[in-house]
Image (cartoon, coloured by chain):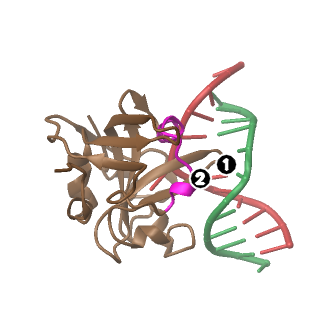
Chain colours: A brown, B red, C green
Amino acid sequence: MSDRLDRTFFGRDALIIAPEILGKVLVRVLPDGTRLLLPVTEVEVYRGLDDRASHASRGMTERNRVMFGQGGIIYMYLIYGMHWMLNIVTGDEGGPEALLIRGVGETSGPGRVTRLLALGKDFYGEDLTSSTRIWLENRPAVENFTTGPRVGINYSGEPWISMPWRFRC
DNA sequence: TTGAAGATGATT
DNA sequence: ATCATCTTCAAG
């Protein structure tokens, strides 16, 4: 019995998954075999073609194509020329959604998360439901969490700028 | 082909 | 408040 989260978990709406994923344990097996186990503490939702803060709002491109696929796949991208962002695609085929992982364990900040976990370009498209080097393990849902507007998306305008799609515990 | 901007983080 | 650093994408 594995308690790895499966396609059923990731195949749902990002807004349903966001509060549930808090406290779930992200497992990363480093090249030398070391295992890092860290609970997810903060995520942001990027959801749908209309969401102007989402990369998917300008249609499918080479970069964002995995966002349009099935849930459970990793979407990595480089921002500001130096920080890799870890995203987990959610929902069904066709509906572009993803959760940006902004914090794990004591580490806060999406760029810090990927540096801590040694994640970069080669994790683009990785399947969390079958990978041997990264996955999520089930845990009870956390009791308390807060929500608020997303960070760094002031270009997106209303109502997207104000959507309370940031979740943390 | 080119240039402008960006789902950040560290430092002043 | 500023800057480091470079890929992506849309415009030309």
Q: Chain of mark 2?
A: A
Q: Say which element carries label 1.
A: loop
Magenta includes A122? yes
Numbered mark located on residue A78 in the image:
2
Q: Quadrant of the C terminus of chain A?
A: top left
Chain under callout 1: A
Q: Position of residue A15 (x, y in %)?
A: 25, 57
Q: What amino acid type should be assigned to the residue bearing mark 1?
A: Gly
Task: In this rendered view, identify the residue nearer to me: A144 or A37.
Answer: A37
Q: Specify the segment rendered in magenta.
A: A110-124
Count of residue discs: 2
Q: Circle 1 sits on which residue? A: A81
Q: Residue A137 in the image: state x and y as whole percent.
A: 26, 45
Q: Is residue A160 left or right of residue A33?
A: left
Question: What's the residue at 39%, 37% (across, down)?
Answer: A103
Left or right: A105 in relation to A58? left
